[in-house]
Amino acid sequence: SALPSMATPLPPPAPDPQFVLRGTQSPVHALHFSRGAQAQGCLLLFSGSQSGLVHIWNLQTRRTAATLDGHGGQCVTWLQMLPQGHQLLSQGRDMKLCLWDLAEGRSAVVDSIHLESVGFCRSAILTGGWPHWTLAVPGKGSDEVQILEMPSKTSVCTLKPDADAKLGMPMCLGLWQARSSPRPLLLAGYEDGSVALWDISERKMCSHVTCHEEPVMGLDFDPQQARGISGSAGKALAVWNLDRQQALKVHGTHRLTNPGVAEVTIRPDYKILATAGWDHRIRVFHWRTMKPLAVLAFHSATVQCVAFAPNGLLAAGSKDQRISVWSLYPP
Amino acid sequence: RPPCSMDPALSVVRLAVQEAVHILSSSEDGGHILSTLASLKRYLSDTENSALSGEKEEFATVHFSTLLRSLASKLSPDWLELLPGGRLEALWASFFLEGPADQAFLVLMETIEGTAGPSFRLMKMAQLLARFLREGRMAALMEAQCQQQMRPSFPVLREMLLSKVVGLPDHLGNRLQRENLPEFLPQNYFPLLSEEVLRVLQAAVDSLQGGLDCSISFLSQVLGKVCMHGRQQETLDVLVPQLTTLTNSSCLWQRVCWRLVEQVPDRALEAMLTGMVEAASGPEVLSRLLGNLVVKNKKAQFVMTRKLLFLQYRYTTPMLQSLLGYLAMDSQRRPLLVQVLKELLETWGSSSAIRHTPLPQQCYISKAILICLAHLGGPELQDSRDELLASMMAGVKCRLDSSLPAVRRLGMIVAEVVSSHLHPEGPPLKFQYEEDELSLELLALGNPRLMGDSASEAGGPSLAPATTETPTETPAETMDSKVLRAQPEGSDSEVDSDDEFIPYDMSGDKELKNSKAPAYVRDCMEALTMSEDSERWEAALRALEGLICRSPEATREVSVELAKVLLHLEERTCVAGFEGLRQRALVAVTVTDPAQVAEYLTSQFYALNYSLRQRMDILDVLTLAAQELSRPGRLKRAPQHSHPGTGTCCLLPLATAQPGSTAAPDWRVVVEERIRSKTRRLSKGAPRMGAAGSPNGFNSVAGYFFFPLIQHFDRPLLTFDLLGDDQLVLGRLTHTLGALMYLAANTTVAVPMGKALLEFTWALRFHVDTYVRQGLLSATSSVLLSVPAQRLLEDMPDELLEARSWLADVAEKDPDEDCRMLAVKALLLLEKLKDKLLTSS
């Protein structure tokens, strides 16, 4: 049972952040860790702010190494490094997806894609067949997801639910490819609180499960266990899994004290996960058991994003313009 | 048969004894003495050359004690040395140990009592008596008495024997003082006596088995007398377990045992029965030992059905269970149980009994009622149902009116159980009360199933807690999944243990409140009166106390208005800690602007159209505010301006006492503490120190708090009658006045306040409500503590004298223990006052 027994010693007090990055001068909406190729493996943190800037933080000096301005003052909502280590993708509310070349100290937009949706949906990539990679972005129709073949920017397909399904807008995306199968799959969380699994090659929805009452705000997936988690604007986290018939099933839900989760991220080693809470708090859970491990109440405004570094470091960006960096349960 | 002196054979015995006595008194020749005595032995022994039975009997009844007395008188070291090897002593002792035990015992006791001590003779006799006891002569004595009962007896002799047998430890203890032997100590003697009684009983059983009649009335008398001497425990602790075993296997033993208790004299019955009930391990045992004594004997019936239940209340619950279970175990006795239940409920329902009996007795009676109910079935109760119900209703009504929570709770529990037994089909009566140890015990008693199970002979009626609390799962954050914890099937991930993931403290994870709190007192007031937004309303309430503390000037501008808003504030949505928040805000506003707000609050206390709740709130707020004013920081107010973020000044610990709880408010503890500390200090003779001389902020405003409250208590309003139904508020008022008096120590207004309070006390001193009387008594103590001694004596000598006689009366006669205690404390203060005046003058 989960009841603490009388003999259990008092839990240790909640930890403090390892350090805090200030200076974005604007709410932080996107975070991404990467081992910069040009900086001899030094760990970098990219942050995207509401003012449209991307800050690149050197985690050794804890200062900004560079600032990228490519979204015309519109909020940066998503950041992703490409595998070779010097190309960064950034998505902004200016309906543009920029590809930056950061090699050898450069900071130039080498390519950009015009998005046809102004929504909140963050894009996703799949880099299995490098140098070819797949990009999923919100599509032209409000309920569509568009799949592009990169770097050629060829439109592979548009995934559109049945007209009578009324799933609403896609809110978050996750691309992934099972080890055993060559077929790329897309997980999408929708406005009506459901999560759908799409088979991209067949352009059809394999499975669909309603696991929230409010729009799904973020999801993450653990391919090892074929299990994923999603957070919504409501008061619950949902854990669901994928059976051999590729059907999604709700595995359990976890009630939160306060509603609203902006992002859910599982640590790369699949041991723990973190959520960004609208209640200013970061919550950490044990992934396998979903045992709550910590509630980090550092920020004074909505936490918008959480990211894990390959070495286990956790970063959270908040509307209070600060980025807190934590070291919990080092792998 | 009276001995006939003309019988020649008998005169032979007489001559022999006379000669022996003569030789004993005159001869110095050891051999001669030895042979003379030895020749007398034939009258005692059963050997072949022994005397004729007629001669033996004459020797035993007529001459034996004469001989023993002269033997006893010869005892001295020189006399015993007349023959070597202690041969003379052995022969000497054998007369006491082998002859008729009753006479030997009486002569031994007589000699011991008549011998000055400490001396050789006394110690020899005492050692002989100890040997007498060790060799089982007491059993012989009692057996002989039982056999003699068949023949004409000598009542005087028997009575003397009885008193010596039972009083042996006292006599020996007096005589031997520090030289006393362990055999004669009560804790050793009475168990021995009990063993001897058992041996005689065994003999009686044996003779009954042999078809012979026998009497055991002497044993009954011994048992009765022992119990009357208060030695039930030592005796029955040996007797009862043995009898329990013996009566279990033999109905002859059972008959003997019943006979034993039936023949106990009436005047000893009470002592014996209480001892029995105490020693018996359950109703079965009691039933086996006593039989239907309670039906056969009026006195026993009185003791068992009235005295132990109504006139005394010191017995434990297991004893009550034994007693009432005993009544329930036989069809002849069951009507008594019904009768007992009726009478118990009648007493329980009597309003005067509730007022005049102490709480422990009320508990006792309640327990007895519940035990009766557990034994009685529906059909038996059918006939007297209306009667029982009427008594119960009367009792519940009186108890629910009481201002003591324990009395109220007692009423609720008994009413619940009684009604469930009287109307098992009907909807159950259910009150709301806090469950404590007592209530759980009471509820368990009312449960018949448990009664049956628990009354086992071996372990006694164990009060196994009926409701062992099963821990209820209270998941803080629920994971409503079935299998989330299970290992995912076919997973190749390594089994990571949870142990490395120790959760951090998550207690701070509370619901987030919208930050809609107003930043100014006026805004708060507006939000509280006008706002439709319940979140803003709650935020305003939460912020208010902090804002008042931080901005006293702004508060003073609206103080009375704010107090009015708060006094009338009602909980709109369910706000955690609403009462506390409101109270703290009211206290803060009173402290900030005491004169104005106190004037307003006291005027509202006697105004129309307030609920009792609001009136009591007013009293609480006045007390807390006065306390804060008289001793700033006493309530642990956080330094002002220091926590603008949290905005709460914590009022501790007074305010945490739930308003409305009649548990002794904190200031009363403070008063008592102070009385105690003063008393100790004075008794040590150290110089008395005045209260610490910090400035008393209450000084200038005490009058505003006190006088309006005390002036109007005897003027009933349409909706509010302090001297009538609203005695709970009167109780609170007396406590509040006492507290204000106490807090006004060292102020100039204390003297008129004290005078007014003593008058108030005088007017209400015979109030029927315990809580009111408690308030009056602590108020009196407050007066004695707060008014300077000199002024007390000069300004109110008559009041003091009156108070003194009243206090003495209460200390002696009040049914409530707390009242008596408070009166004693006040008397003590008066004494100290007197001492102080005497020493200073």
Image (cartoon, coloured by chain):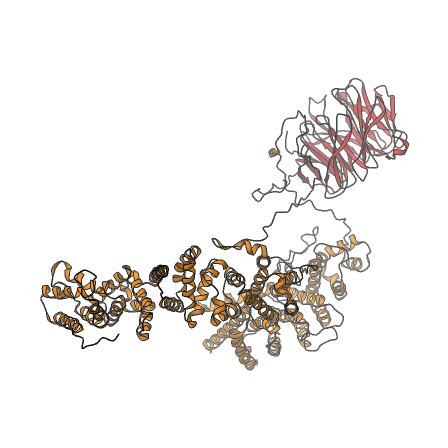
Chain colours: A red, B orange
- Image quadrant in which you'd find residue B768: bottom right
Which residue is drawn at the image coordinates 69% and 61% (left, top)? B583
Q: Position of residue A128 (x, y in %)?
A: 77, 20
- Image quadrant in which you'd find residue B719: bottom right
Q: Is residue A152 above or below residue B146?
A: above
Query: Residue B185 or B748: which is nearer the viewer?
Result: B185
- Image quadrant in which you'd find residue B490: top right
Q: Position of residue B95 (x, y in %)?
A: 20, 64
Residue B492 visible in the snapshot: yes
Q: Is residue B679 above or below residue B284?
A: below
Query: Residue B54 or B395: which is nearer the viewer?
Result: B54
Residue B692 visible in the snapshot: no
Q: Locate the N terminus of chain B by quadrant.
A: bottom left
Farthest residue in the front direction? Answer: B211
Horizontal side of residue B220 vs A196, given as left or right: left
Query: Residue B836 or A146: which is nearer the viewer?
Result: A146
Horizontal side of residue B722 vs B126, given as left or right: right
Q: Position of residue A227 (x, y in %)?
A: 73, 29
Q: Is residue B447 above or below residue B737?
A: above
Q: Position of residue B828 (x, y in %)?
A: 50, 72
Tally of numbered discs: 0
Query: Residue B286 or A325: which is nearer the viewer?
Result: B286
